[in-house]
Image (spheres, rainbow, N blue to C red):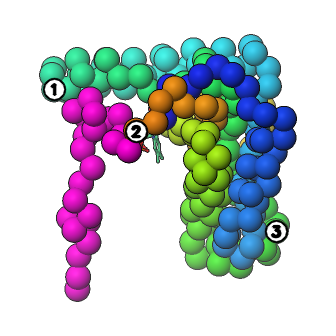
Amino acid sequence: MRRFRRDPLPDGALEELLQLAQQAPSVGNSQPWRFVRVRSDHLRTDLANHVDVQVISAGERIADATKRAAYAALKLHGLREAPEIVAVFCDEETQAGTGLGATTMPEARRYSVVLAIHTLWLAARARGMALGWVSIVDPAHVKALLAVPDGWRLVALLCIGWPEANSSVPELERLGWQKRIDWRQNVSER
Ligand SMILES: Cc1cc2nc3c(=O)[nH]c(=O)nc-3n(C[C@H](O)[C@H](O)[C@H](O)COP(=O)(O)O)c2cc1C
């Protein structure tokens, strides 16, 4: 989702989504997600400008000319329009959970953060809202802009709001970029 209406969410709606996200499962019950709600207009603009630059430079790295032209026509974020912007980090140094399950697989903390995002995403959809995950960023730059602690790793930059339109077919499929793959292709047996 990248096409948002500009109208705000009702009072308390984002807080409710964040509260639901807190119910997500996490390794050792460490709850390592850290949500940063971006309220400042100038930070929003800085983030949008940053992503625009990253989108262009990612496009320049596409070797195939047809694909490069198709890429240039894609809209890849709604950072200027979405009423809410939330950056999500993983606290890699959290003491919560006392390292249970994360000693051999520290990345399990990041997977837990993804689950919290997914919980928030589904809760938003169930309420008619939409969520756009923006990943075309330089994480170090976003960390610096938002002045978060060193031990936090960026997992996602989220746009949340009301969708301009709903469709059961992904926009990238409708535009011929990438269709949904038959599920059987992604399952194997041993
Ligand atoms: C980890 C992750 C990163 C994504 N990053 C972007 C992004 O930077 N820009 C964008 O427009 N969409 C992004 N998306 C959205 C995907 O393009 C989208 O989920 C996919 O095309 C399937 O469409 P659907 O979610 O509408 O079913 C991202 C999705 C995920 C899960």
Q: Which residue is mark 3?
A: 96
Is residue 49 in sight in this rendering? yes
Q: Which residue is mark 1?
A: 64
Horizontally, is 169 left or right of 104 in the view?
Answer: left
Does 145 sit above or below residue 160?
above
The answer as to whether callout 2 falls within 8 Å of ligand 1 is yes
Is 172 magenta? The answer is yes
Q: CA distance from mark 2 to mark 1?
A: 29 Å
Give the mark nearest the N terminus, 3 or 2.
3
Does 60 sit above or below residue 190?
above
**Amino acid type at image mark 2:** Ser
Looking at the image, is mark 2 or mark 1 nearer the viewer? Answer: 2
Instruction: Look at the numbered disc 1 and give the secondary structure of its residue.
Output: loop
Residue density around tag 3, few if under 14, some if 14–19, many if 20 or more, within 10 Å? some
**Amino acid type at image mark 3:** Ala
Give the mark nearest the N terminus, 3 or 1.
1
Task: Answer with the quadrant where ligand 1 appears in the image.
Answer: top left
The region drawn magenta spans 168-190
Task: Please tell me which residue is depicted at 69% across the width and 22% down the height of the picture.
Answer: 7
Task: Please tell me which residue is depicted at 31% across the width and 17% down the height of the picture.
Answer: 72
Q: Determine whether label 3 and label 2 are within 8 Å by CB.
A: no
